Image: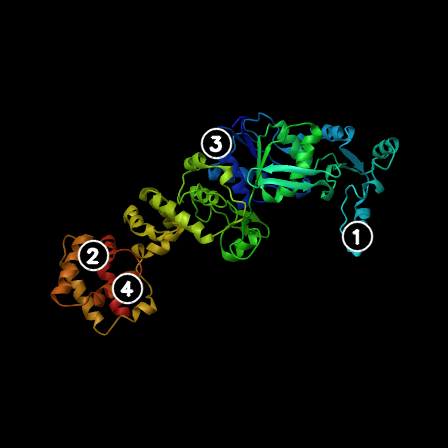
Amino acid sequence: MSKQVRVRFAPSPTGPLHIGGVRTALFNYLFAKKHGGTFYLRIEDTDQTRFVPGAEAYIFEALEWLGIAPDETVGKNEKFGPYRQSERKAMYQQYADQLINSGWAYYAFDTAESLDAMRKEAEANGKTFIYNHSVREQLDNSLTVSREKVEERIANGEHYVIRFKTPVNEILELKDIIRGDIKFDTNLLDDKVLFKSDGMPTYHLANIVDDHLMETSHVIRGEEWLPSLPLHHLLYKAFGWNAPEFAHLPLILKPIGNGKLSKRDGDKMGFPVFPLEWKTEEGTSSGYRENGFFPEAVINFLALLGWNDGTEQEIFSLEELVQKFDLNRIHKAGAKFDPEKNKWFNHQYLQKQSDESLAESFKVILDKKGISTSLDLTKVVSLIKERAHFVNEFWDLADYFFEAPTSYDEKAAKNWKEETPGLMQQVISELNKIEDFTSVNIETLLKEWMTANEIGMGKVMQPLRLSLVGALKGPHLFDIIEMIGKAETVKRIEKAIASL
């Protein structure tokens, strides 16, 4: 790559970071690292009316947790600071003025009421009102009012905006790394607002100016910004600047139906759409972290939403993703979010964890439940982990190791026949004879006893598991017996005989 790669993630602090935004940040991060470049984060908070306290800190914490923190951002390696647009406010005016002076923009004094009236009139006539070349010469702006009058109105504190003067009768032939060649007819574009009389720029102006001043080489963003591409291209032209290369990422789609993945989909189907939990007065939105996802699993899953390396490989470390990432392998079509696949990835990463570290996490859960145990938690974890997607499922998978059953599965209890209590008494006798109380030895001796007495396996094994676990679930039965010990095993069988 000829120029130094500098890419950015530029969220607005208007609420929690959506998982779609996380993927945008991830793809920027991977691209930067692949090319030995810089990944920076800029906070785009020009719209102060939508600012939400805590949202900015949330964004930083989320990216840190995911392992894709930026190289430069607010308070970190501020090479082109400040990195908050609200703190760059003073510089945007000069660029807006530059566009006015060069004839690429104009002042517009139209009130919100007058524009609304024109929209309604157009609708009544079956048309759509667009503020562009077709109407701008008839409206209340500096194209129709003398320079002196414009200056007088501004001096008097009259509200205005600065609009971009979109060229007429041009076909823009633009390139997008993902989508290829795209054509836009300038006659179909509106004259977007670039600057407001409160001294704040709109996204369009601030983003172009900042990308230029911060030496952004590639803009990798969601496809919702594709309609803005012609305006952004024209703004670079108007300033006489070289434009970065653009890549517009496909949407992350709902699991069921059409359209973009939303928080509502997550609420309805019981999966998170935010990396971290987000609390408001209205309630709490769940987060991947609090739901027990490993950050590596989230990254792996998101990377494959809209991209693949051309192979069947599914499990990638962050280092492998960096090595293999290629913008040209991003799909144009949207990628459906699959909650089950999401859980599958977490299951894969859970299996990769050491039993020791998982045991530590499980101990936290047991402590919260007020359960102290002398059992080897590492061994317990090794027996149950392959059935788990999350550490927080360990208790449901292993509660019988720590507590005797208080009830018995009704369906399984139907296998408790008239002869079962007598057989279970015999099992107790056999267990009491065993001195080397290890899983392998218990299994060998009990099966020898069953074979010698021509007792069917099902007649003993199912009722025995029911006695110890309360249901027909759990790992190898004899591993359970070894873990809970002889005395506890006998006690539970006796309780089952008395209860069932």
Residue under pointer 3: 33
Instruction: For marks 3 and 1, give the CA distance.
Output: 50 Å
Which residue position is annotated with label 1?
122
Res. 329 in view: yes
Query: Residue 319, image x and y in percent?
Result: 42, 35
* Of pointers 1 and 2, the one earlier in the residue sequence: 1
- Left or right: residue 383 versus residue 130 is left
Which is nearer the N-term, disc 4 or disc 2?
4
Circle 1 SS class: helix
Closer to the camera, 267 or 54?
A: 267
> Which amino acid type corresponds to the residue marked 3 in the rendered image?
Lys
Q: Name the residue: 69% across, 27% down.
A: 240
Give how far apart the Cα atoms at labels 3 and 2 are.
57 Å
Here the colouring is rainbow
* Residues at discs 1 and 4 in contact (Cβ within 8 Å): no
- The reply to whether discs 1 and 2 touch (Cβ–Cβ < 8 Å) is no
User: Hey, what amino acid is under mark 4?
Assistant: Leu
Residue 3 position in % (x across, y down): 55, 26
Q: Nearer the viewer, residue 106 or 243?
A: 243
For the question of whether residue 363 can be seen, the reply is no
Secondary-structure class at tag 4: helix
Local packing at callout 4 (Cα closer than 10 Å; few below 14, some 14-19, many 20+) is many
* Lower sequence index among marks 3 and 1: 3
Q: Which residue is mark 4?
A: 466
Query: Considering only order in the chain, which callout, 4 or 1, is on the residue closer to the N terminus?
Result: 1
Q: Which mark is residue 486?
A: 2
Q: Is residue 457 above or below residue 96?
A: below
